[in-house]
Image (cartoon, helix red, strand yellow):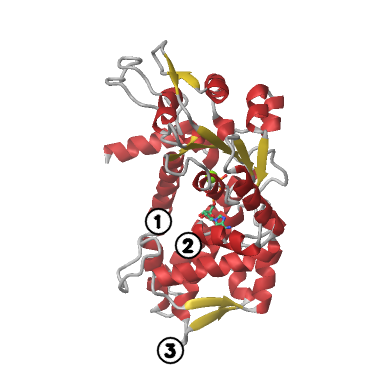
Amino acid sequence: MDVQELQIIKNKHDIVGNSPGLNRAIEMAVQIAPTELTVLITGESGVGKEAIPQIIHQLSRRKNGRYLAVNCGAIPEGTINAELFGHEKGAFTGAIGERKGYFEEANGGTLFLDEIGELPKETQAMLLRVLQSGEYMKVGSSKVEKTDVRVVAATNVDLSYAVATGKFRQDLYYRLNAVQIAVPSLAERKDDIYLLFRKFSSDFSEKYSLRKISLSHEAITLLTSYRWPGNIRQLKNIAEAVTAMEAPSAAPGAERVEVDSHTLAQYMPREDDTLIPATVSTGSGSGMSENDKQMFVKAILDLKNEVDDLRARLDGISQPAMAQPRILEVRKEDFAPADEDFSEPEAPELTIRKASDDLIEKALLKHGGKVKPAAAELGISERTIYRKLAEKKSK
Ligand SMILES: Nc1ncnc2c1ncn2[C@@H]1O[C@H](COP(=O)(O)OP(=O)(O)OP(=O)(O)O)[C@@H](O)[C@H]1O
Ligand SMILES: [Mg+2]
């Protein structure tokens, strides 16, 4: 495949990077697209797996059919069979009407099953059957249905480990793993790091009419020498945070502001964080992965910095009057630009409570309202979440 063709695909899917590992993954997707083969996409969390099934779909003969993406880890165990395969009227309490499943909806198209390692064993058996014969049954029905769906699956856990521990069916693993596309981690494509930073930073500046950011030579070295356990997702968050915070300090009339390594370091997680266990098994398919842990710790550290800032303000050791309210405003409105806000900041305790409520809410949303995985991800007890929910209700 020549460089130009590859670049067209990257542009179309908003993919930035030129590393050999990334190019190989895209080339494999292009090659495999016209076939009917089932594909398994592997790679750490945040490496950009989600673009691959879209490339496959759009270059396949199914491109005019539907493309559906389903995050298996976000659907509660009790409803996943009904969501994937549909259910009959009255199949279970609450099944008022009939419902089509994703395998029916995606008939003639492509179904992307993300976090495939999270599928319950019973669902794995149903998936294997539909992969082998195109046949399935709706929940509560004994009628065999037919569908023509191409499945692309993805995982950020080591499925062979899940097979070894009995959590994942071996036959399904072999079936899915016939073609594996491995998306490399950011640490394996260091040359792409600054390219990606520039893209995320300039997209962000454009979106919020901010000045552009560039990095000094040393800052680029700092950026590329970090190991990026949260991969591109983490890099994007940091690029956006740096831009949001630093762009407003550009001198009047200046087109861009150069961020030095000292400033950048304030936004980077410390490599020697003792809070993070040195090795965490990522193969179990449950609990927090090392990446998640690092992201979570980062969120807590960010929170702590925010509270320290607020404390400093309250103690009267604040920085110039103009700078801080702008930063507060940017954070409050999720980086949306807004008029200056000179109102009193909230008390630190309130900010902490709100931030922890937000974290819980986000985790619940991510896990489709399931308390157990949300609690596991946050490293707090399920009881704490239930208490928070009850508090919220009684307000
Ligand atoms: N090469 C790339 N160029 C530009 N943006 C990218 C690239 N790869 C990933 N991204 C962006 O990084 C973020 C994370 O990517 P994505 O959601 O595909 O990760 P993932 O591998 O599916 O992670 P997870 O396993 O946690 O679901 C997304 O916002 C995506 O748009
Ligand atoms: Mg994903």
- Residue 185, image x, y percentages: 67, 52
Q: Amino acid at mark 3?
A: Gly
CB-based contact (under 8 Å), mark 1 and mark 3 = no
CB-based contact (under 8 Å), mark 2 and mark 1 = yes
CB-based contact (under 8 Å), mark 3 and mark 2 = no
Q: Which mark is residue 253?
A: 3
Label 1 Cα neighbours within 10 Å, binned few <14 / some 14-19 / many ≥20: some
Q: Amino acid at mark 2?
A: Glu
Q: Nearer the viewer, mark 3 or mark 2?
A: 3
Label 2 Cα neighbours within 10 Å, binned few <14 / some 14-19 / many ≥20: some
Pointer 1 or 3: first along the chain: 3
Q: Which mark is residue 306?
A: 2
- Residue 209, image x, y percentages: 39, 74
Determine the residue positioned at 41% across, 63% down. 331
Q: Which mark is residue 142?
A: none
Determine the residue positioned at 48% across, 40% down. 62
Instruction: Give the SS element for disc 1.
Output: helix
- Residue 61, image x, y percentages: 50, 41
Instruction: Give the SS element for disc 3.
Output: loop
Q: Is residue 126 left or right of residue 186?
A: left
141 lies above or below 189? above
Measure how far apart labels 3 and 2 are at the Cα level.
29 Å
- Residue 272, image x, y percentages: 70, 57
Q: Nearer the viewer, residue 388 or 57?
A: 57
Residue receiving disc 1: 351
Residue 84 shows up from this direction: yes
Q: Which quadrant of the figure has residue 386?
A: top left
Q: Nearer the viewer, residue 346 or 87?
A: 87
Viewport quadrant of the C terminus: top left
68 lies above or below 218? above
Pointer 2 or 1: first along the chain: 2
